[in-house]
Each structure stands twice: as structure tokens, then as C-alpha cells.
Image: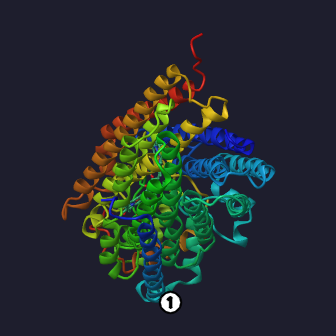
């Protein structure tokens, strides 16, 4: 195969092909950035949701959990935890979250451990708001079932 | 060694290997925590061990790339390095920043580290692989700029070869795409979208250019084939890489809130991504067959061929396995992802470092013909222990991921919960850990080969 292709042909494929790929990808990226606000309900990103996202980050939650399938695979998916534990009821979910965060780490021997993060009630509320917002993102119906 | 300034590479190589030992050790801690949830808790929670594991991995690869560039660019450019002093200073800056960051992870809770480093001024922490405090990220940018400047000036002032130009393109891309690590919008979807500009466009884009350049350099040196031939192969491989890999980023945009056209575009483009890895196998084996010299350093060529094969298995085969949207729907974020992550990182980016280190270190240590036969025999054992060890680790993870899909994802009724599924998989995780131990023993054997002396 390589006998029929000369070095300058190979170089032209490299430059031409890369340029084409970059243009296609840049164009699609611009389009995506314009459509994400609607797909993610960006108008519902309240200050509480934004604070919740920051808490998610500075406590490195993604170091154990996945969120929409990305992160670590040690602990359950949390992109749909509102659906799983709150069943559509925001108040019930927030109460559940307060109890859950306060109870960590569970004392069952041998079980994988989640640390105690010493968050205030308001902070847990922000995290819950962030997870509720996340659960409503239009992500092509992922995950396949409620278990995540 | 043709130019005395190539010597700056030595520290970089040694430090990369030390970090690799740390990385694999923390891998064993993680593997144990998968089986015994209490292990080292609360001293080292899983997320902390994982950060250390993955951050060491990335930093060691960066050290390895820098060492490779400092070694091969003077020889290719036929002149001394622009500034050996700058290269030495940057080594100590980067090493100190790296060690301080790892200690930060281990010694204080992550939220405290965020506070201590004023993360609130420019929040960038707490995203996978990019957990470093903002100040460390700024440090990485400074080191990368000084490095690219040093290498760029050497290349511009000397002989320009296809290898050095491709290498420089890759290194520039590495530095530029890292800048997206500073963009952290409140919208999680946009955050994820641009996070992949760093992660995917690194490993399936510009890093493959660096990989191709290093591989080509070593192949020229140990086979003596002519440069025209090498250049043509290199161009073809990186052309396929960028044509498929850039738009292939779309295989991460299926289920994170991006528009649904990515389901098609990401699947089709990334389905082509195994091709450049396959070409790499043909390349390495064809060059080996057409070799004009028989270099005494046999292990360098073994590592080069091994890199091509293992990168194809890890990135090409395991990547393809879950890259089509309908399959990814069920495998997304399971142990199959971890299986692929392990074999691709090891096969492509750790093995290419072994390739160049295996070729260059003996020369840097005053042995132009490679290590003695006895040392090479030990190194060959180490090669097989690590390769079989990592194949074992990933095979176990493929089984674990498949179980996850069948127990947790596929059933419409009576699907097991995440935690219940993990309990079912524990026996497989034990097999994974055993193969992990084998890989670590392989690495220790490799270190030992450095100290094997010729029989008098
Ligand atoms: C010594 C054997 C090793 C063991 C037992 C091990 C174990 C682990 C574990 C348990 C995780 C966390 C998975 C999770 O998030 O739940 C992990 C992550 C990771 N490790 Fe290792 N590891 C080992 C060696 C390596 C090596 C040699 C490399 C690369 C060359 C590597 C690269 C990675 C990467 C890239 C991730 C993140 C994976 C992802 O996000 O998909 N590991 N490792
Ligand atoms: C050497 C090259 C490669 C490396 C180092 C690499 C590494 C990785 C890593 C570490 C992840 C996990 C990221 C995370 O934590 O979320 C990942 C995900 C993924 N990779 Fe690769 N990869 C490479 C090449 C490829 C190729 C060639 C393909 C396709 C043919 C591919 C397909 C995928 C897909 C589809 C995912 C997402 C998995 C999921 O949905 O959970 N990769 N890769
Ligand atoms: Fe990718």
C-alpha cells in the first residue's frame, strides 16, 4: 500500500484532512454551545444550583461517583439520584439528602465508605438543588433504568 | 550521546519512573478498597487515592514527554539544546510543584486544600483528572511554556525534520488545549463539553502526534531504515489520527446533554479511530523487517513493537468496543470504561516511555550499545510481567463491566442496585488485584535490570 503513496501525498492528506476536521468540529461546537441552554434548562440555574455545583467540585464528589456517566466508578450514579430517591418530590429529596449526608460514614464493616464532609444545612440544600437541576437535563434518556 | 545537552533528559526519565512506581502502588490501594471498603479509611478515602493515582499518571507522562523531547530534539536538529539551564530549572520547579500537590491531596481534606489555595478566586478544582489546585495549574502552564520555548528555539535554529516538526505540533497542542482546564462554567453541560477538549483532544489527538514522533525516532535509530520511508508512515498515521480523532470527540457527547446529532457523528468518526493504531502495528513491524542494522539494544525494538500492539488493543479494540452510541448507552461509566482507560494509557503512553527510556538511558549512562545481554534478559522478563499483568487487569475489568451491564443496566424489572452489583463482582476484583500485583512486580524487575552488571 505505502509504495504507491509518496511522502508529499501523505503530507497533503495530513494538512488537508486535519484542517477539514478542525473546521467541522469547530462548526459543530459553536452550534452545540448555542443549543445547550435549552437542552439543559439553563434558565433554571439559580444561585443555589451554582453554589451546589461548586460544593460538588470542592468536595471532589466525582472522585467516587459518576454524574451522567462520567467520574469514578466506585459509588452510584448521581445524575438521576433525584429520580431514584426523590421520585419527583423536591421536598422529600431534600429531607433525604440532609439525613444521608449527616449519617456518613455508615458504620457497616467492609462496606465502601463515603466520608463525612461537615456541610451545613444550607450547603446540603444547595447540593440537592444542583442534583435536581442535573436530573432534568435532556441527555438522550440516559441512564437505561433507575439504578443508573 | 552526540550532544552533551541531551543529558538533561536523564533526570526527567528517572523521575517519571519514580512517579510510575507511586502511581501503580496507589493503584493497588484502590484495587484493595474495591474489595475491602474500610481499607485505609478514613486516612486515605478512595477519592484521594484515585486523585493521586491519576494525577501521578498524567504528570509522569508529561515528565516522560519532556525527557523524550530533550533527548531527541538536539540529535534531530544537529545542535545543542537552546538552554540546558532552563530545562534543568524547570525540572526542579515542576518536580517541587508536583510533590507539593500530591502531599496536599494526602495531608488535608480536599475542601481545605481548595480553601488554602484560594480556589474561590478562580475555581478550577474538583473535576476528574483536573483536580490540581489552580495555582498548580498555573505552574503547569509556566513549565509548559518554558519547555515549548526551549524545544521550539532548538528546532527553529537547527535542522528541521518531520519528526521534530510533528513533535513540536503535538507539544504546542498539548499546551494550548490545557488552557480549557481554566474554563469552569456554572452550566454542568458546557463544563463537561469543554472538559473533553482537554482530555479527549489530548489522548486521542495531540498526544498521538507525540507518540508517533517518539516511535519514529526510536525506529530510525534501532533499524537504520531510511528517513523518507519513516516520514511517509508518520504523516499517514497522524493524518488518520486527526481526521478521526478530532470529530471523534463526539463519542463523549452522547449522554451529557449535548444535541443528539452527536449520536451519529460521534459514532461514525470515532469508529475510524482504531485505524491509526492499526497502522502503527504495520509500521513498527514493517520497519523491523526492513531493518538495515542489528542494534545491540534488542529491548528498545521489543518495546517499540509492544507499544504498537498494546496501544491498538487498548485504544483501538477496547475503544471500539464501546464507542458506538447504542452500545455506549449500556456501557457508559462502567468498569468497561476503566478497562479501556487502563489498557490504552498503559499500552500507548506508558509503553512509549519505556521504549524511549530503554533506548536512551543506556546511552545516557555511557553504554552506546545498550545494556549487557544479562540486563536485557532481565528487562525482557519485566516486559512480559508488565504486559501480561496489565492484560490481566483489563481482562478482569472487561468481565466486571459486562456483569454490571447485565445485572444493573439491561434488566427492565428487578435490576440490581449499583451497590448490590458491586458485591456480586468482588471475586473478579480479586483477580484484578492479583494481576495488578504482577504488574508492580514487573516494574520492580524493570528497575532491577538497571543494576544488573556484566559478568567479568
Ligand atoms: C497496578 C495496577 C493498577 C490497579 C490495581 C489500578 C486500579 C485502579 C482503580 C481501582 C481505579 C479507579 C476506578 C474507579 O474510578 O472506580 C483506577 C483508575 C485509573 N487508573 Fe489504574 N490501576 C493500576 C494501574 C494503572 C496503570 C499502570 C495505569 C496507566 C498506565 C492506570 C491508569 C488509570 C486511569 C487512566 C484511571 C481512570 C480511569 C477512568 O476514569 O476510566 N492505572 N485504577
Ligand atoms: C491512547 C488513546 C486513548 C486513551 C489514553 C484513552 C483513554 C480513555 C479514558 C481514560 C477514558 C475514561 C474517561 C473518563 O474518566 O470519563 C476514555 C473513555 C472513552 N474512550 Fe478512550 N482512550 C483512547 C483512545 C480511544 C479510542 C481510539 C476510542 C474509540 C475507538 C476510544 C473510545 C472511548 C469511549 C467511547 C469512551 C467513553 C466511555 C464511557 O462512555 O464511559 N478511546 N478513554
Ligand atoms: Fe475519547
Q: Is residue B216 above or below residue B130?
A: above
Q: Chain of mark 1?
A: A
Q: Residue at x 45, y 50 (%)?
A: B348
Query: Residue B34: in sight, yes or no?
Result: no
With respect to residue B314, does A61 lie above or below? below
Locate residue B317 relative to residue B352 in the image: left or right.
left
From the top left corner, tell me how far across and down residue A9 is, in percent.
41, 70
- State the SS at label 1: helix
Residue B253, given in percent of the width and then of the height, sits at 39, 73
Numbered marks: total: 1
Q: Quadrant of residue B290?
A: top left
Q: Position of residue A23 (x, y in %)?
A: 46, 82
Q: Position of residue B167 (x, y in %)?
A: 57, 59
Q: Disc 1 marks which residue?
A: A43
Asked whether B126 or B130 is in front, the reply is B130
Instruction: Between residue A106 and residue A53, name the one nearer to us.
Output: A53
- Judging depth in this view, the residue of B1 and B255 nearest the camera is B1
The picture quadrant where one finds residue B248 is bottom left
Crowding around mark 1 (Cα neighbors within 10 Å: few <14, some 14 to 19, many 20+) is few
Q: Pick the quarter of the image with the N terminus of chain B.
A: top right
Q: Which residue is located at x 62 percent, y 64 percent?
A: B125
> What color scheme is it?
rainbow
Amino acid at each position: 500500500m505505502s509504495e504507491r503513496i509518496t511522502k508529499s501525498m501523505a503530507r497533503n492528506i495530513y494538512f488537508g484532512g486535519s484542517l477539514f476536521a478542525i473546521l467541522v468540529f469547530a462548526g459543530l461546537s459553536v452550534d452545540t454551545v448555542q443549543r445547550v441552554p435549552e437542552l439543559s434548562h439553563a434558565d433554571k440555574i439559580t444561585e443555589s444550583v451554582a453554589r451546589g455545583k461548586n460544593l460538588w467540585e470542592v468536595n471532589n464528589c466525582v472522585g467516587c461517583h459518576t454524574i451522567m456517566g462520567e467520574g469514578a466508578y466506585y459509588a452510584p450514579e448521581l445524575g438521576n439520584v433525584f429520580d431514584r430517591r426523590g421520585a419527583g418530590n423536591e421536598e422529600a429529596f431534600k429531607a433525604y439528602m440532609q439525613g444521608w449526608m449527616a449519617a456518613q460514614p455508615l458504620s457497616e464493616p467492609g462496606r465502601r465508605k463515603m466520608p463525612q464532609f461537615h456541610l451545613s444545612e444550607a450547603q446540603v440544600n444547595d447540593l440537592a438543588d444542583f442534583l435536581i437541576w442535573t436530573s432534568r437535563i435532556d441527555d438522550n434518556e440516559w441512564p437505561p433504568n433507575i439504578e443508573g | 550521546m552526540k550532544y552533551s545537552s541531551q543529558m538533561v533528559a536523564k533526570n526527567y526519565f528517572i523521575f517519571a519512573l519514580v512517579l510510575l512506581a507511586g502511581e501503580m502502588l496507589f493503584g493497588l490501594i484502590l484495587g484493595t478498597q474495591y474489595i475491602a471498603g474500610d481499607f485505609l479509611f478514613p486516612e486515605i478515602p478512595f477519592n484521594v487515592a484515585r486523585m493521586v493515582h491519576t494525577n501521578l499518571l498524567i504528570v509522569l507522562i508529561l515528565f516522560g514527554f519532556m525527557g523524550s523531547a530533550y533527548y531527541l530534539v538536539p540529535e534531530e536538529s544537529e545542535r545543542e539544546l537552546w538552554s540546558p539551564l532552563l530545562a534543568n530549572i524547570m525540572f526542579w520547579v515542576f518536580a517541587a510543584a508536583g510533590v507539593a500537590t500530591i502531599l496536599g491531596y494526602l495531608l488535608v481534606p480536599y475542601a481545605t486544600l481548595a480553601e488554602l489555595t484560594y480556589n474561590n478566586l478562580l475555581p478550577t478544582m474538583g473535576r476528574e483528572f483536573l483536580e490540581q489546585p489552580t495555582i498548580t495549574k498555573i505552574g503547569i502552564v509556566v513549565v509548559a511554556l518554558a519547555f515549548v520555548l526551549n524545544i521550539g528555539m532548538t528546532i527553529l535554529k537547527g535542522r528541521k525534520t518531520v519528526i521534530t516538526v510533528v513533535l513540536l505540533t503535538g507539544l504546542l497542542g498539548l499546551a494550548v488545549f490545557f488552557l480549557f482546564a481554566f474554563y469552569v462554567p456554572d452550566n454542568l453541560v458546557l463544563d463537561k463539553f469543554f472538559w473533553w477538549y482537554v482530555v479527549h483532544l489530548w489522548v486521542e489527538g495531540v498526544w498521538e502526534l507525540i507518540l508517533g514522533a517518539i516511535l519514529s525516532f526510536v525506529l530510525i535509530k534501532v533499524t537504520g531504515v531510511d528517513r523518507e520511508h519513516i516520514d511517509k508512515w508518520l504523516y499517514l498515521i497522524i493524518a488518520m489520527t486527526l481526521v478521526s480523532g478530532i470529530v471523534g470527540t463526539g463519542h463523549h457527547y452522547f449522554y451529557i446533554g449535548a444535541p443528539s446529532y452527536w449520536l451519529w457523528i460521534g459514532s461514525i468518526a470515532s469508529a475510524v479511530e482504531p485505524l491509526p493504531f492499526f497502522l502503527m502495528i504495520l509500521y513498527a513491524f514493517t520497519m523491523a523487517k526492513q531493518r538495515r542494522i542489528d542494534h545491540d539494544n534488542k529491548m528498545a525494538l521489543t518495546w517499540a513493537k509492544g507499544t504498537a500492539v498494546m496501544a491498538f488493543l487498548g485504544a483501538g479494540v477496547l475503544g471500539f468496543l464501546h464507542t458506538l452510541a447504542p452500545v455506549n448507552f449500556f456501557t457508559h461509566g462502567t468498569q468497561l470504561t476503566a478497562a479501556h482507560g487502563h489498557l490504552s494509557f498503559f499500552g500507548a503512553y506508558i509503553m512509549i516511555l519505556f521504549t524511549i527510556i530503554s533506548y536512551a538511558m543506556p546511552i545516557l549512562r555511557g553504554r552506546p550499545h545498550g545494556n549487557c545481554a544479562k540486563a536485557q534478559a532481565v528487562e525482557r522478563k519485566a516486559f512480559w510481567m508488565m504486559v501480561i499483568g496489565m492484560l490481566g487487569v483489563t481482562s478482569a475489568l472487561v468481565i466486571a463491566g459486562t456483569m454490571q451491564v447485565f445485572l444493573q443496566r439491561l434488566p427492565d424489572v428487578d435490576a440490581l442496585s449499583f451497590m448490590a452489583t458491586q458485591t456480586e463482582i468482588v471475586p473478579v476484583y480479586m483477580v484484578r488485584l492479583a494481576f495488578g500485583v504482577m504488574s508492580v512486580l514487573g516494574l520492580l524487575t524493570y528497575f532491577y535490570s538497571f543494576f544488573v552488571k556484566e559478568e567479568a
